[in-house]
Every structure is written in C-alpha cells, then in structure tokens.
Image: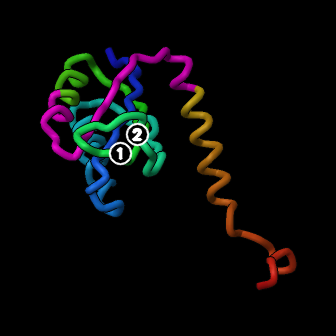
Amino acid sequence: MLKHYEMVLIVHPNVPEEETPTVTDRLTALITQQKGEVVRLEKWGKKKLSYKIKKCNKGYYFLLNFLATPTLLTELERVLRYDENILRFQTVKVGLEEVEALRTQGQKESKEEAQVGELPEEASPEG
C-alpha cells in the first residue's frame, strides 16, 4: 500500500543552479520506477542555513511530496545518504487528506500558469 510522504532536501550550494534539477529528476525517476507517484515538487531556491552543514552556509531547498511503499522510502533514503550533492534531507509521513489538497491546489496553479501571459492586446502594459 502506498503511503504519502513529504521530504525536504537541501542540495549543496556548489552545484550550479541549472544542474539542481538533475538531482531531483533522479529522485523522481526512482520513485516512478518503483511504482510510486510524485505528487508535487517545489523549488524553494537558495537560502541561508541556520547553521553550517559540511562547511556550507547556504543550500538549495526542495520540497517533494510523493506516494511510496515503505521499502521504496528505505531505498530512496539510502540513495540520498550516499549522494555527495545532498547536504541534508528529512522525510515525514503525511495524512491522505493532505494529498488530495495538494492535488487540487496543483491543478489550480497549473490552470493559473496557463492563463498568465495571455493578456488581451488592449490590456497589455506599455513599456
């Protein structure tokens, strides 16, 4: 049975920003290969850490919501422990009602993103 998990990742700041998606793509690929489901992936950006981790003051933050089996979660955490690009990660189990809320919120955001930039010609700002 799939359970819902939420994971916060901190990626090493020496990884170029354009290469940070490769780290998360690898995780999402592992989840989908093992018959899990990625519900949502949020990029929070580069932020200052509360304390130094591996001599770093900053890191790229990501939030990953996914459905997985406990064995998949164990494998995912094993992969993260040996990845040098990951400073820290933390996984928590979340209730199923939050999964549905995330899905509906994600659908609303995707509809809003599709509408952005579709301004009528008369309403377009002058530059």
Q: Residue at x 22, y 40 (%)?
A: 54
**Disc on the earlier residue, 1 or 2:** 2
- Dot label at residue 90: none
Whether residues under marks 1 and 2 lie with C-beta atoms below 8 angstroms apart, the answer is yes
Residues 37 and 79: in front is 79
On the image, the x and y values in percent for residue 92 come to: 39, 19
On the image, the x and y values in percent for residue 70 come to: 25, 16
The colour scheme applied to this rendered structure is: rainbow
Q: Which residues are magenta?
A: 78-100
Return the residue found at the far left. Answer: 82
Disc 1 residue type (three-letter): Asn
Residue 88 visible, this angle? yes
Q: Quadrant of the N terminus?
A: top left
Q: Residues within 10 Å of mark 1 (few under 14, many from 20)?
A: some
Residue 43 visible, this angle? no
- Dot label at residue 49: 2
- Vertical relation: 37 (above or below) 45: above
Q: Residue at x 34, y 19 (%)?
A: 2
Disc 2 residue type (three-letter): Leu
Asked which secondary structure carries label 1, the reply is strand
- Vertical relation: 55 (above or below) 98: below
Q: Residue at x 22, y 31 (%)?
A: 34
Asked which secondary structure carries label 2, the reply is strand
Q: Which residue is mark 1?
A: 57
Residues 63 and 40: in front is 63
- The answer to whether residue 121 is left or right of residue 72 is right
Residues 7 and 26: in front is 7
Q: Residues within 10 Å of mark 2 (few under 14, many from 20)?
A: some
Residues 77 and 123: in front is 77
